[in-house]
Each structure stands twice: as structure tokens, then as C-alpha cells.
Image (spheres, rainbow, N blue to C red):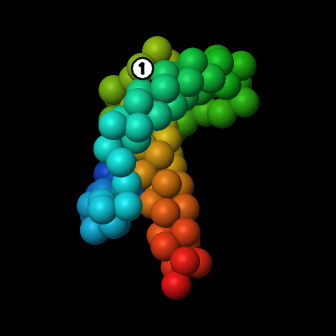
Amino acid sequence: MSYAILALLVIFVFLIFGFALRKWIRTQPMLVTMAGMVLLTAIFDNLIIWAGIVAYDPEKISGIKIGIAPIEDFSYTVVAVILVPTIFNLLAKVQKK
């Protein structure tokens, strides 16, 4: 399985999760956070790959890159930005009961 297919599957699952719980999530702050996190991911992932700490099998990546970081590497950031506030708000709602 390629990194791209795995990344798309994971993002798809968490987009459904985020959509189902959307009444607890404010969209504008999430989009601002997403932009900042993607920018930081672009900077630091490129540094980590350039330093040789992480390497990707060229046959398993899509070939689309931001700098030297494959686009699939950004899926973790997208999932975290969706998952963290969703779980936080869900747990806060459950705790109020």
C-alpha cells in the first residue's frame, strides 16, 4: 500500500468524524490553526528529511512534494488539527453531564 492511499484513508475517516461532530467545532479557528500547522510541518519536515533523520521509499510516495517532503507527510497534521479539538470538545460535553 502506498503512503498516499494510507494517508487518504486516514484523512477520510477523520473528516467524517469531524463532520459528524461539527457542532462542537468552530471552523474559522480550525482553518487558521490548519494553515499554521501546515506551514510549520513544511518547514520542520523538510529539515528532518534533509538531515537524514527520516527517509521515504520513493516507490511508495505519490511524487508530489512540498520542498523535499512528500505531500503524504502532511496528512498527520491534517488529522491532528481535526482530531484534537473534536475530542477535546466531545470530552468537555461528556464531562458536563
Q: Quadrant of residue 47?
A: top right
* Residue at 57%, 18% in the rendered image: 43
Reply above or below: 10 against 28.
below
In this orientation, which residue lies closer to the viewer: 15 or 26? 26
| CA neighbours of label 1 inside 10 A, class few (<14), some (14 to 19), many (20+) | some
Q: Residue furthest front?
A: 96
Q: Which residue is mark 1?
A: 66
Question: Residue 10 location, x and y as percent?
Answer: 39, 58
- Apparent side of residue 66 relative to residue 87 in the rendered image (left or right): left
In this view, the residue in front, 17 or 24, is 24
Q: Position of residue 9 (x, y in %)?
A: 33, 59
Is residue 31 at all visible to an observer of this figure? yes
Q: Is residue 62 positioned above or below 85 on the image?
A: above
Residue 58 appears in the picture as rendered: no
Q: How far across and how far down the image is residue 68, in percent?
A: 50, 19
Relative depth, front residue between 92 and 47: 92
- Residue drawn 67% across the image and 25% down it: 48
Please provide percent x and percent y for residue 6.
Answer: 39, 55
Question: On the rendered image, what quadrant is the N terminus found in?
Answer: bottom left
Q: Is residue 78 above or below residue 82?
A: above
Residue drawn at x 30%, y 60% is 22
Q: How many marks?
A: 1
Residue at x 32% of width, y 44% of height = 27
Question: Element under label 1?
Answer: strand
Amino acid residing under circle 1? Ile
Residue 92 horizontal side relative to residue 75, left or right: right
Q: Taking 56 as reference, is 7 left or right?
A: left
